[in-house]
Amino acid sequence: MKTNIGNEGFTLVEVMIASVILVIGLVALLQLISIAIYGSVAGRDITIADNIANRLLQDMDNRGYQNAMNNMTSSGTITDGTNTVYVYGSAVTTAGYSRQPVTVGPKNFYLNAQYTDNTPSKGLSTVRVYVDWTTTGHPHTVSFTSYFDMS
């Protein structure tokens, strides 16, 4: 019988090099998956915040400006010298302004709306809506500005 000794299989060095290359590839893939998950969560949170802000603006638009203003409970006013800015929101006061908590799933979003009458011109009202939240200790905010006919 004829045998070929030493001509078959891989050497230990070849197996170790292949293992290192495989581990590097797997680590890179895991990091990519982690980034994709974080991006997905961040996108979901931004979409929720956008929906909260848009819901308030649509409610104001559907009811008419004066009707919506009569139903908003003001938690205070800010005077900038010429205009009075009314602040909507209550229950939670942070950073000098009130915010209305809105819970979606396990996360709290905070809604704040400020409106200034007769700005940018007489008969118009500027409405600024802010929604903020915190993800893993990092604050995030989305904001919208809209103009309403005060009549």
Image: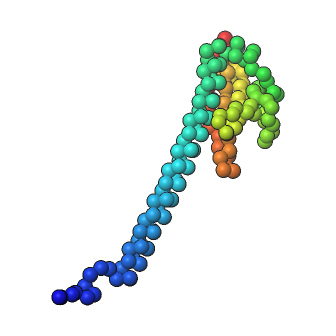
- Closer to us: 150 or 109: 109
Please state if 71 lies on the left or on the right of 3 as rendered: right
Height in image: 52 above or below 13?
A: above
Q: Quadrant of residue 128?
A: top right
- Closer to us: 71 or 35: 35
Q: Quadrant of residue 148?
A: top right
- Percent position (x, y) of residue 147? 62, 23
Specify the color scheme. Answer: rainbow
- Furthest-front residue in this view: 1
The residue positioned 79% from the left and 40% from the top of the image is 94
- Percent position (x, y) of residue 87? 76, 28
- Closer to us: 39 or 56: 39
Q: How many marks?
A: 0
The residue positioned 67% from the left and 21% from the top of the image is 125
Height in image: 42 above or below 74?
A: below
- Percent position (x, y) of residue 25? 43, 65
- Furthest-left residue in this view: 1
Height in image: 133 above or below 123?
A: below
In the picture, which quadrant includes the N terminus?
bottom left
The residue positioned 65% from the left and 24% from the top of the image is 56
Q: Quadrant of residue 86?
A: top right
In the picture, which quadrant includes the C terminus?
top right
Q: Is residue 81 visible?
A: no
The residue positioned 50% from the left and 50% from the top of the image is 36
- Closer to us: 50 or 87: 50
Q: Is residue 69 visible?
A: yes
- Percent position (x, y) of residue 98? 78, 33
